[in-house]
Image: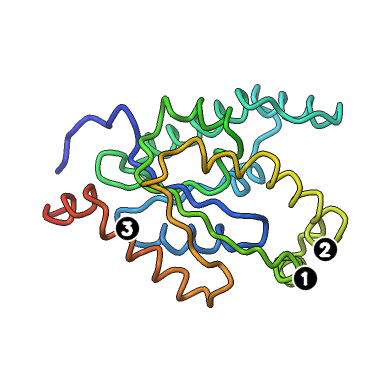
Amino acid sequence: MNDSPPPSKFKTLIVMGAPGSGKGTQGSIIGQIPRFYHFSTGDAFRRLDTRTEIGQQFVKYSAEGRLVPDEIVVKFCVAQLDNAVDAHAFKADVDFLVLDGIPRNTRQAELMDEHIDVLQLFHLSCPNREELIRRLRKRALKEQRMDDANEEVIRRRFETYERETKELLEHYPSEIVTDIDANQPPVKVLSDMLQAIIQLPDWQEFSKQVV
């Protein structure tokens, strides 16, 4: 039994890309592999209990038509990760954290730097916006996510991504950023990501251990 205390920072892989690039799909698949824990902010927000104090803050900003401040978003996500550690769902001393949906901008990245040690950032690149729109509409029909069916809403989300999220590529050292062609079949995208992961020194060191 491993009684090591949890690390001060979570060993982290970040998956980022424009809406429809497949980051949620890939993050979820990798999270099914032993010793990886996938955390999706989208899933966490959908499970948010609005009766809690932080839930009420989200409701307040939403009701006023304002974005929730980055500090509150990060506080919420870190609390969810700590809860997963306490519940032994996320074994932070041996698991690699796979983040999907956070950080979304440079300010969130700065706040998250206190909690995570980013080993790799996967940028799922898909310049063909029409292909992304097709994917989002297909997902909207399959999962009843009507926000993904409105082209005007989709294009606004692209604009937000271009304006804020791409700044993350400059926040992190270039040597930990890996561009992945998201236009490839999903299985090839997954293969490219796994090939990069098994080259990481932290993974190679970990793979020598018996867990």
In the picture, the quarter occupied by the N terminus is top left
Residue that carries the numbered disc 2 in the rendered image: 149
Residue 142 x/y as whole percent? 72, 71
Relative to 85, residue 151 above or below: below
Amino acid at the residue labelled 2: Ala
**Element at label 1:** helix
| Side of 201 where 120 appears, left or right | right
| Side of 111 where 160 appears, left or right | right
Identify which residue, 171 or 8, lies in the foreground. Answer: 171
Residue that carries the numbered disc 3 in the rendered image: 197
Q: Counting other residues with Cα less than 10 Å from the Cα at mark 1, is it few (<14), some (14-19), or many (20 or more)?
A: few
Q: Counting other residues with Cα less than 10 Å from the Cα at mark 2, is it few (<14), some (14-19), or many (20 or more)?
A: some
Identify which residue, 79 or 49, lies in the foreground. Answer: 79
Amino acid at the residue labelled 3: Ile
Residue drawn 27% across the image and 32% down it = 6
Q: CA distance from mark 2 to mark 1?
A: 8 Å
Disc 2 + disc 1, Cβ < 8 Å: yes
